[in-house]
């Protein structure tokens, strides 16, 4: 449950039971972390006339030391990916690690 959901739920319970809600805030503990290595591979193929598009993407998520934060390592093979695309991948990578 999200923090706002807990607040709404506490408010509804307080209204139904004729209680005044306490002034202490709700606290939700988030203890999820990557516990083992996860490999994800995706092949993108799109042919709609002309030269088309092709990409073979492999992403590897590994656990790190507690408190180390997020570390991004680029291991491009072939050198055909423009350097302008790398910052966008770095920006999206933390949200990807949350969904694995």
Image: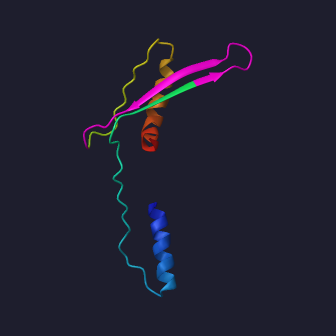
In the image, is residue 49 part of the stretch drawn in magenta? yes
Tally the numbered discs.
0
Which percent across, then down, holds residue 64? 28, 37
Part of the protein shown in magenta: 44-66
Residue at the right extreme? 49
Q: Nearer the viewer, residue 43 or 30?
A: 43
Q: Quadrant of the C terminus?
A: top left
x 25%, y 39%: residue: 65
Residue farthest toward the bottom in the current orientation of the protein: 18
| Residue shown at 43% from the left, 44% from the top | 98
- Residue sitting at 44 percent across and 29 percent down? 59
From what the image shows, is residue 15 above or below residue 76?
A: below
Relative to 78, residue 94 above or below: below
Left-right relation of 2 to 69: right
Residue 54 percent coordinates (x, y): 60, 19
The residue shown at (59%, 24%) is: 44
In this rendering, the answer to whether 39 lies above or below 1 is above
Measured as percent of width and height from the top left, residue 19 is found at 44, 86
Image coordinates of residue 12 in percent, x first then y, are 51, 77
- How is the protein colored in the picture? rainbow
| Residue 53 position (above or below residue 13) | above
The reply to whether the magenta stretch includes residue 56 is yes
């Amino acid at each position: 449950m999200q923090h706002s959901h807990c607040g709404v739920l506490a408010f509804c319970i307080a209204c139904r039971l004729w209680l005044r809600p306490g002034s202490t805030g709700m606290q939700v503990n988030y203890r999820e972390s990557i516990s083992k290595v996860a490999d994800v591979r995706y092949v993108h193929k799109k042919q709609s006339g002309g030269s088309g598009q092709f990409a073979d993407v492999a992403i590897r998520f590994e656990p790190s030391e507690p408190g180390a934060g997020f570390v991004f390592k680029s291991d491009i093979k072939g050198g055909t990916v423009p350097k302008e695309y790398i910052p966008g991948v770095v920006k999206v990578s933390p949200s990807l690690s949350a969904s694995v």
